[in-house]
Amino acid sequence: MTGDKLTVYPAIDLRKGRVVRLLYGDPSQETVHSDDPVATAQRWQAAGAEWLHVVNLDGALGEATLALETLRAIAGVSLPVQFGGGLRSLDDAQRALDAGASRVILGTMVVNQPELAGQAVARFGADAVTVALDARGDQVATHGWQQVSAWTPADLGRRFAADGVRHALYTDVSRDGDLSGVNVSSTAALARDTGLAVIASGGVASLDDITRLRKTGIIAGVVIGKSLYTGAVALEDAIRLASSDV
């Protein structure tokens, strides 16, 4: 028996207006899954999704775009949206929230200026903010995972928690998009070390990953991307397992 259920976040990664998946965050290894992000959102809604995880890859990879029109259209599906990619200031985060995001993902900005995480919580509320603790090895990756910082996820996570941050996204970049299995042990360790509500991401390959995450009793959620789009995992089954006692 575990505690609260694991929240499943189907991923919608946006690039040039299409739904894509990258391998290890590499923009040269892209697979296009749909030309219609709203139809994709509706597909996951019909399958029982309670949240959507939307990432603007154009922004994450350095292009000066917030994809707010696409965000607004996806938010019109009437599911809460966790949105990130290219948010480089608190004003950018405000624009995303105004466009319909329920929660913004702050990455490179708060890694480079950690004090901004606490300022974001003060401005938007703790439930509207997720910090990205994406790891390449044992260092937090930035700039669309193309660079690494001097921080470890645990050290930075503790800093953020002390400033009132409640939610964190942990991606093992070495597994993202390759269906090798989610890094359960590192995700659970980060949750224990920081006290943050940590969402696992990267490498989900099968329903067994959902069961393993659920059994920890400490991981708050999981982002599922490629395995949904390839059909390896059915969202309905993932949601059922995530909310069951194991």
Image (spheres, helix red, strand yellow):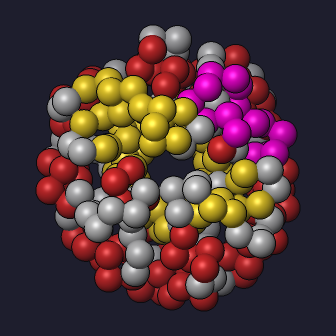
Q: Looking at the image, which residue is at 25% across and 36% down?
A: 18
Q: Is residue 221 above or below residue 44?
A: below
Q: Nearer the viewer, residue 90 or 180?
A: 180
Q: Is there any visible trace of residue 130 in the rendered image? A: no
Give coordinates of residue 143: x percent, y percent.
Answer: 53, 63
Q: Looking at the image, which residue is at 60% across and 79% down?
A: 112
Q: Is there any visible trace of residue 70 in the rendered image? A: yes
Q: Is residue 28 above or below residue 104?
A: above
Is 61 inside the magenta-drawn segment?
Answer: no
Q: Is residue 189 above or below residue 214?
A: below
Q: Which residues are magenta?
A: 174-188
Q: Could you tell me how many numbered marks the image carries?
A: 0
Q: Looking at the image, which residue is at 84% across and 50% down?
A: 189
Q: Nearer the viewer, residue 150 or 181?
A: 150
- Quadrant assignment for the N terminus: top right
Q: Quadrant of residue 176?
A: top right
Give coordinates of residue 158: x percent, y percent.
Answer: 77, 73
Left or right of 56, for residue 242: right
- Quadrant assignment for the C terminus: top right
Q: Residue furthest front?
A: 28
Give coordinates of residue 201: x percent, y percent.
Answer: 61, 41
Q: Looking at the image, which residue is at 25% across and 26% down?
A: 34
Give coordinates of residue 226: x percent, y percent.
Answer: 49, 25
Q: Residue furthest top?
A: 231
Is 178 inside the magenta-drawn segment?
Answer: yes
Q: Quadrant of residue 93?
A: bottom left
Q: Nearer the viewer, residue 243 or 89?
A: 89
Left or right of 2, for residue 166: left
